[in-house]
Amino acid sequence: MRERKRAHRSYYLSTLTLAGPVVISQLGHTLVQTADTMIVGHFAGTIPLAAVSLAHSVFMIVLVIGLGISYGLTPLIAQENGKSNPIECAKLLSNSFWINLISGILLFCLVYYGSMYAMAHTDQDPLVVREAKPYLLLLSLSIVPLMVFNTFKQFAEGLGFTRQAMQITIWGNVLNVVIAIILVKGMFGFTPMGIRGVGIATLIDRILMMLVMMAYVLRAKYFKKYIQHFNFISLHYNRIKNILRIGMPVAMQYVFEIGAFAGASLIAGKIGALQQASHQVAITLAAMTYMMASGIAAAATIKVGNSFGNNNLFRLQRFATVSYHLVLVFMIFTALIFAIFNQQLPLLISKDAAVIALSAQLLIIAGLFQLFDGTQVVGLGVLRGMGDVNIPTLITFIAYWIIGLPSGYFMGIILNWGIQGVWYGLTLGLLTSSLLLFLRYRYIVRLQG
C-alpha cells in the first residue's frame, strides 16, 4: 500500500516539476499583453485602453494560429524521444524551423492586409481604431521572431527541458516592461510615444528572446546528441506533413477559442467603449490563469505523448488523471481569488472608476468559467499527446461558434443583458467544450484498451 501511494505521488510530482516552468513560460506570452494593457491603462487613458483591447482582439487570432502551428512539434518530439530516436528529433526540429519562419511571415501579411481592414470595418469607435492601428502593426512584426523562438522552445519542452524557456521568458518580460514604460512616458529624453511605445517594446523583447533561445538549444550540452544530427536544410515532405497534421488542427482549436473571445470583444465594442475597456481588463486577468492552465496542459501533452510512444496505456491514463486533478485544484483556487478580490484586481490595470466597477462584475462570472476553461484546455493537451487532434478541433468549433458566441450575442445584445450576457455565453461554450473533450478522451482510452 505504501509503495502504491509513493508511486501515485510520483506522477503528481513529475507532472508538477515539468508543468511549473511551462506554466511560467506560457504565462509569459500573456504577460506581454498584460503589461501593455497595464501600462496603457495607467499612463494613457480609457480610449487607448480600448484601443489595446481592439488590437489584441484581432491580433490574438493571428498569434494563436502561429502558436498552434508551432505546438505541432512538441508531441512528435515527445513520442520520438519515448522511442529513443534522437536523429528523428533533430530532423523534426529543422523542418519545424522552416514551417514556423514561413508561417510567421505569412501571418504578418495576414495582419497587415487583413486585420487592419477588418478592424476599420466592424463598427468600432473611430478614435479607438486610429489609436490601435500603429500598435497592431508593431505587434504583427513581432510574430516572426516569436515563431522562431517557439520552434526551439517547443523542441526543448518536448524533450522535457522546460526551465530554460521559462527563464528567458521572465527576463524578456522584465525588459519589455522597462522599455515600454520609458517609451510610453517619454523618459530619458525620449518623446512620449503612447500606445506605440508598448508595441516597440514588445518587438524588441521578442527579437532578443528568439536569439537567446536559439543559442541555448544549439549550444547547450544537454542537446548535443540531438543537435549533432541537426541541419537547417534537412527538409522532408513527410515530416512537414506530420508536423502540420498536428499543428494545423491545434492552430484551429486556438482560433476557435480565442476567436470567440475576440468576437466577444467586438460585441462589447458595439455596446460601448466602457464595456469594451472593462471586457479587456477582466479578460486580461482571466487570460493569465488560462495560460497557467495551458502550461499544465502542455505538460500533459509531453507526459501522455511519451507514454503513447512507449505504448504504456496505464502510465498514459495516470498522467491524464493527474493533469485533470491538478488543473481543477488550481482553477478552484483562482476562482476564489477572482471572487474575493474582484474589486481590487481591476486596479492593477485601470484607474477609471466606471471600468473598475464593471470589471469587478465580470470577474465574478470569470470565477465560474475558470473551472471549465482549465479542464477543457487539459482535455485538449491529453488528446494532443495521443495524436488525436481532428475531432477535438470540431468540438471546439461547435462549443464556441455554434453555442458560446451566438448565445453570448443573444443574451448580451438581443436580451439587452449587456457585457455580462456576453460572458454568460462564453461560459456556456467553455462548459460544452470541457464535457465533450473529456468524453472523447474516455472513448479513445476504451479503443486503446
Image (cartoon, helix red, strand yellow):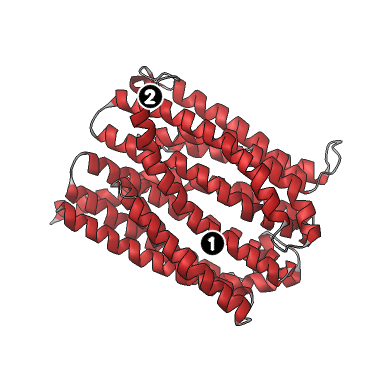
Instruction: Relative to 209, say whether 304 is above or below.
Output: below
Q: In the image, what residue occupies the spot 37% across and 20% down?
A: 224
Q: In the image, what residue occupies the spot 68% across and 59% down?
A: 349
Give percent across and percent down for residue 283.
59, 62
Q: Residues within 10 Å of mark 1 (few under 14, many from 20)?
A: many
Location of mark 2 (residue): 223
Give percent across and percent down for residue 103.
53, 36
Instruction: Relative to 374, say whether 424 is above or below.
Output: below
Give percent across and percent down for residue 257.
49, 58
In what element is the residue under mark 2?
helix
Q: In the image, what residue occupies the spot 83% across and 40% down?
A: 187
What is the CA distance from the residue labelled 1 to the residue labelled 2?
39 Å
Location of mark 1 (residue): 260
In what element is the residue under mark 1?
helix
The front one of 83 and 418 is: 418
Please say whether residue 123 is visible from this viewpoint: yes
Give percent across and percent down for residue 118.
67, 54
Q: Horizontally, is 128 left or right of 55 in the view?
A: right
Q: In the image, what residue occupies the spot 62% across and 49% down?
A: 59
Q: Of label 1 and label 2, which has the lower sequence position?
A: 2
Instruction: Relative to 18, say whether 405 is above or below.
Output: below
The kind of residue tagged 2 is Phe
Q: Residues within 10 Å of mark 2 (few under 14, many from 20)?
A: some
The kind of residue tagged 1 is Ala
Displayed quadrant of residue 181: top right
Q: Residue furthest bottom?
A: 415
User: Which quadrant would the N terminus be assigned to in this image?
Assistant: bottom left
Please say whether residue 331 is visible from this viewpoint: no
Of badges 1 and 2, the one in the foreground is: 1
